[in-house]
Image (cartoon, rainbow, N blue to C red):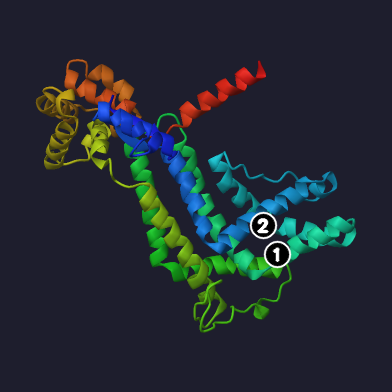
């Protein structure tokens, strides 16, 4: 046994009495890998520490429920994307779709608070006032932008053929992108504010009347950043804390605790050809040290494996198409390399496929 993967449920992943600990005591090489998809979902949940984000998510969910509660209301906006807490990619799609239809939703609320029944008018007016507030509009623009960026990554992390090296590279790419935006916060947020101001104009809201909140000596219940403009206030109080929270959560949820095990994926020719001889020598030593007697005679066989592919005239495009399963046949005369490839194939990046099969089984049994 060389790997075990769960979500963060303490019964399974607990370091003291969890299944993770019990298995690790018997199989020391069975390192624990936190499900990448669960980790990504928890990153979104971590953003609930920002009150503006909490309120924005709550308001959008309330707005969708309001329109779906009546056929008459639904006709005005069509079939809106509903938030599904158990389907992770839907969280990003939900906020992106809401932002795309924001003007239509607000216009529908303006109609309903004049033409609906008593209950509808009251609820529509409350939602209209909340959705047209500057804080909500700016928050929606911020989280919609990064939801659109994170959505495809979330979908990739739920695929059946992703490996831990690709998983790590994706997460590091996201963190780098967020840090770049954090460094260029002024320019990045300026574009978001222009988008927000465009929404103000479309809704016939007087932009000049929007002011930053008053700064006081002591304030514990809202942002209290000194600023000379509305843009600067929201950049300091919302945009930068949002990016900082995303970066911190990603770095905490996706630590490099098992980084040494990722290097076994460097046996793929696509990776080997991009590494120097010195780097590959270090990687081979690390793999041998990490997996020990599981890979007998690995050092010499790995050198033969590298030499074989460096002499091969296969194109980079063809190499990129090769999966680890394809490589097993080519490594049949190098048993230690073949064993290493099998280990790479078995390391759990996510538990999505397993959970889908369990869910399908439960559904089938219930149905029968």
Query: Relative to the observer, which residue lies in front, 348 or 190?
Result: 348
Taking the image as drawn, is residue 367 in sight? yes
Q: Residue at x 31, y 21 (%)?
A: 326
Mark 2: secondary structure: helix
x, y percent for residue 91: 57, 46
The crowding category of the residue bearing disc 2, from other C-alpha atoms within 10 Å (few below 14, some 14 to 19, many at least 20), is some
Name the residue rendered at 74%, 71% in the picture.
Answer: 204
Q: Position of residue 301 (x, y in %)?
A: 13, 24
Q: Is residue 189 left or right of residue 19?
A: right
Asked if the residues shown at circle 1 and circle 2 are in contact, with their CB atoms under 8 angstroms apart, the answer is yes
Visible in this render: residue 173? no
The residue that label 2 is drawn on is: 59
Residue 303 spot, x, y in % from top left: 12, 29
Relative vertical location of residue 230 with respect to residue 108 in this rendering, above or below: below
Depth check: give the residue in front, 366 or 192.
366
Residue closer to the observer: 246 or 181: 246
Give the side of residue 132 with respect to residue 182, left or right.
Answer: right
Q: Quadrant of residue 3?
A: top left
Q: Residue at x 54, y 42 (%)?
A: 89
In the depicted structure, whether residue 239 falls above or below residue 164: below
Marked residue nearer the N-terminal end (1 or 2)? 2
- Indicate left or right for 301 with 252 as reference: left
Residue 347 rendering spot, x and y as whole percentages = 33, 30
* Distance (Cα) linking label 1 and label 2: 8 Å
Identify the element where label 1 is drawn.
Answer: helix
Determine which of the numbered discs, if any, sits on residue 183 in the image.
none
Front-most of residues 193 and 14: 14
- The residue identified by callout 1 is 130
**Residue sticking out furthest to the front:** 17
The correct choice, above or below, for 176 with respect to 223 in the image is: above
Q: Classify the position of the N terminus by image quarter.
A: top left
């Amino acid at each position: 046994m060389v790997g075990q993967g769960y979500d963060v449920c303490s019964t399974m992943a607990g370091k003291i009495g969890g299944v993770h600990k019990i298995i690790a005591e018997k199989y020391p090489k069975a390192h624990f890998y936190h499900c990448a998809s669960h980790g990504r979902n928890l990153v979104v949940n971590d953003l609930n520490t920002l009150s503006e984000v909490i309120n924005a998510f709550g308001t959008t969910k309330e707005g969708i429920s309001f329109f779906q509660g009546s056929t008459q209301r639904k006709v005005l906006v069509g079939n809106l994307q509903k938030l599904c807490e158990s389907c992770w990619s839907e969280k990003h799609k939900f906020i992106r779709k809401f932002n795309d239809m924001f003007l239509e939703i607000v216009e529908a609320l303006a109609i309903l608070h004049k033409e609906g029944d008593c209950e509808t008018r009251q609820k529509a007016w409350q939602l209209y006032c909340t959705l047209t507030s500057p804080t909500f509009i700016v928050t929606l623009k911020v989280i919609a932008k990064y939801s659109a960026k994170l959505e495809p990554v979330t979908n990739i992390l739920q695929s059946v053929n992703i490996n831990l090296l690709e998983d790590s590279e994706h997460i590091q790419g996201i963190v780098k992108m967020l840090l770049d935006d954090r460094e260029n916060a002024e320019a990045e947020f300026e574009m978001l504010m222009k988008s927000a101001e465009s929404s103000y104009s479309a809704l016939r809201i007087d932009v000049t009347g929007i002011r930053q909140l008053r700064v006081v000596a002591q304030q514990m219940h809202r942002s209290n950043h000194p600023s000379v403009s509305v843009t600067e206030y929201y950049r300091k109080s919302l945009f930068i804390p949002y990016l900082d929270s995303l970066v911190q959560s990603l770095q905490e949820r996706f630590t490099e605790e098992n980084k040494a095990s990722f290097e076994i994926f460097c046996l793929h020719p696509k990776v080997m050809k991009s590494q120097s001889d010195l780097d590959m020598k270090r990687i081979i030593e690390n793999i041998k040290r990490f997996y020990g007697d599981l890979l007998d005679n690995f050092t010499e066989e790995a050198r033969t494996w590298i030499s074989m592919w460096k002499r091969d005239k296969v194109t980079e495009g063809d190499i990129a198409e090769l999966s680890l399963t394809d490589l097993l046949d080519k490594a049949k005369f190098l048993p230690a390399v073949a064993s290493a490839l099998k280990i790479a194939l078995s390391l759990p990046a996510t538990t999505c496929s397993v959970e889908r099969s369990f869910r399908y089984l439960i559904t089938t049994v219930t149905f029968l």
